[in-house]
Structures are given as C-alpha cells and as structure tokens.
Amino acid sequence: MPATILLDLSHTSHTRARTGIQRVARSLWRELGPAAAPVTFDPHQRTWRPLDPWELKNLGTDSFSRKRGASWPVTAQLRGHTRRLLGHQSLHAQLSALRPSGLLVPELFTPAVAAALPALFAATTGPRVAVFHDAIALKFPELTPAKTVARFPSYLRELLAFDGIAANSEDSRATLLSYWDWLGISPSSRPAVTVIPLGIDPVCHLMDDKPLGLAAEKSKSRIRKSEIPTLLSVGSLEGRKNHLALLDACESLWSTGENFELHLVGLAHPQTGRAALARVHALQAAGRPLRHSGPVTEAALAAAYTACAFTVYPSLIEGFGLPVLESLAYRKPCICSAHGALGEAARGGGCIALDRVDAPSIAHAISRLLSTPSALAALTDAARARRFRTWSDYARDLATWLTTLDRRV
C-alpha cells in the first residue's frame, strides 16, 4: 500500500460554507484523492479520527450554507461521546495500515485543534506542513472579526511547530516572516517557508489552444448599445472586501446616467459585512439596478462570470485573490488593487490595477471600460493570453514539496 498524507479537515468537513479556505481544503481533498487520508479532531470523542460518511458527504456536495461555522448534528455528538466512553480506537491506533508519510493542514485551525496537534504530529514520522493564507487580521484588525483578531497572534506562534509553511503568495510569505522577525525568532528556529500559489478550476475554453481571433474576441467583449452590461463582483461581503467603496462608485455613476447592472455574489459576514449589506438594501430600495445573490453553486457562479461584461474586485487585501484569476480565466477583465497578493495576480495582464481602491478610482475605471470598447477588448485579449495553474497543479506541488522537507526536532 502506498504511503498516505494525513489531511486535516476539521473545519471544512463540518461546514458547507464556500469561503476561500474551504475551497482550498476541498480542492486538495479532491485532487490528492487516494494519496490523502482526511482526518478531523472530534471534540466529542476528544481524539483525532478518520472522517465519517456524513463528513465526506459535506466535502463533496455542491450545496452551500449561509453559515461559516462548523456544525455537528446531535447524532454525531452522541456518537462521539459513545465512542469515547467505549474506548473506541483513536486515530493513532488506526495508522499502521495508512503508513502516513506526512501531515498537511490547509485550514486556519482553532485553539481546540491547536491543542490537539501534538497528538496528530506524533501519528506520523513524516514532515508536517501548514498552508498559510494571509495575515489580514494583523494588517486590518479594524476590518476583521474580533475573535479572529484576538486569536491570530497565538496562531502565528503555533505555526512554528510545523516543518514547513506553504504561503499562498509572496506577500503572505513576507508578512509571516516579518512578524516572526518582530517577535525576535531566529531563522534557525523557524520552519521552512515557501510560496506555492493556489490554482483554479479549469475553464473549458482555456483547454482549446486555437486562437479565436482578435475580431471575434472584440465582438464578444464589446458592450452593445442595446444591452445593459452587467458588472460582477464575487466575494463575501465583509469589511476588508471594501464593498462600500464599490457601491459608492456605482451610485456616483448611476446618478450621472451610466446604464449598467451590478451583480454581487457572496455571503454577507454577520459582523463586518453589516454596513455593506445595509447599503445594498438602500440602493435596491431606491431602484438602482443591483442584485445580491448571496452564496451560489459552482454552476451559478460560472453562469455569472459568463454573463458579465467585466468584474470588479474592490478588496483592500487578500492572501491570494481567487476571484481575480477566475475572472481572467473566463476572459473577463478585472478591476482590482495593484498591491499585495492582488497585484501579484494582476501582474500577468487583463486587469486594471488601481493604486487606490477608493470610490473615485473604482468609478473612473468602470466608466473607462463601459465607454471604451477598445480598452475592454485589449484587456480581454490580455486575459485570454494568460495560462492559469489548476488545483491539480497546486496539490501536486504541495505534496511534492512536503516530501523534500526534513522532520524538525
């Protein structure tokens, strides 16, 4: 039997939310396939164990939830208590058949999971790798949920126990190393930190290497006078995503007679997304052409990308910025920030990268693409010329890098 990588999915296996971290975790589970053994810390059984069928179903479903938190049905809670009372085998006792060659933790783990990690570390003699998504809670604490801000310093220290950290972007890697420098932690006391960019799901038209031709592309990207163009913005409504600036920008354009629809896709955060959601409702009540679909299935998301003229991703900071690359993969130009990980995503072309993602700058960029078909066509051509990493590429690179690491004492 080939060696297996333990894959910690303690949160993702108990939620149907589709935030960026959940997409990374689910994609790794799907792409690693038999090479990965998904596990969870069961707080009711008080041990690590392989996933039960209902948890595997959560990973594979295309349905979604409007709640981000983990959910444990009463039956699962009772099962965990029963297993614990009956002395059911722990994960450690089941590992002889799995021959684990390493451990991969793609989630932002909780204090409870962190406290249980030593037991999981002991279950494999191979390298232990964590995925590092971002340090947004450090840079924008005022736009981050209070619990996340309070938790984050401990989390960044807990990462020091791993053998390797795979950052999603150069910006995320640099921020993590800078924080450890600030703590006074010497390089010899740190795990190896590398950058392994995320992937995206393949888009069918990218599999065809035959050029469509400039004229065909221009005809597709041109905004017809008889149609109302749709601008798409994909991302959860929360403080750092900066939807208020986007909504102000659109309102300023609508008030001067610009004719377009704004379509928002994404879950509203109950704490930091409240102001943006209230603004959405106010604009809708005023009769503005604005839709908010909330979370949607993968098929509905693909349809939204296909139907739009271009996208706007007004986020102030990201660890990677999947919606930017997904937009470009659909040959839809994107307006986004020129800084940090978003600047890295925009670097290959197809974007209007803004030095400031405030309302006037966003409005100017939208107006330019609405009024200048040649500018939209040029960005469409640039997007079409790009090639994108897939989730398969990401899983392969991450698993390969894991095998190169030494186990730290």
Image (tube, helix red, strand yellow):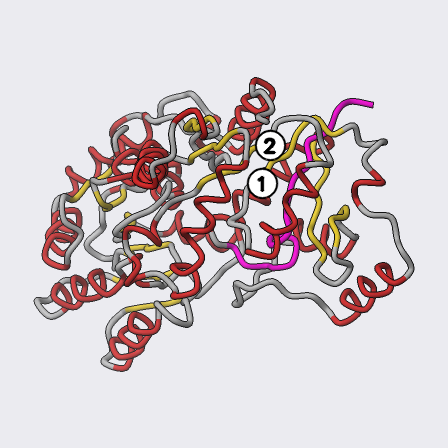
Residue 50 in the magenta stretch? The answer is no
- Residue 103: % across, % down: 64, 34
Does residue 293 appear in this view?
no
Total tally of numbered discs in the picture: 2
Residue 378's tag is none
Q: Secondary structure at mark 1?
A: strand
The structure residue drawn at horizontal position 84% and vertical position 39%, both measured from the top left corner, is: 94
State the mark number for residue 105. Answer: 1
Residue 161: which quarter of the image? Answer: top right
Horizontally, residue 18 falls left or right of residue 366, namely right
In the rendered image, residue 19, in percent from the top left (x then y), is placed at 48, 54
Q: Secondary structure at mark 2?
A: strand
Stretch in magenta: 1-18
Left or right: residue 356 versus residue 329 is: left
What residue is rendered at 87% in x and 48% in y? 89
Decide which of tag 2 and tag 1 comes sooner along the chain: 1
Image: 301 above or below 196: below
Q: CA distance from mark 2 to mark 1?
A: 8 Å
Q: Which mark is residue 128?
A: 2
Amino acid type of the residue tagged 1 in the rendering: Val
Instruction: Work out whether 137 lies above or below 322.
Output: below
Is 8 colored magenta in this rendering?
A: yes
Visible residue check, residue 332: yes
Quarter of the image holding residue 210? top left
**Relative to 87, 185 lies left or right:** left
The percent coordinates of residue 349 (x first, y second) are 25, 31
Residue drawn at (66%, 26%) of the image? 126
Q: Nearer the viewer, residue 226 or 246?
A: 246
Crowd rating for badge 1 (residues with CA inside 10 Å; few <14, some 14–19, many 20+): many
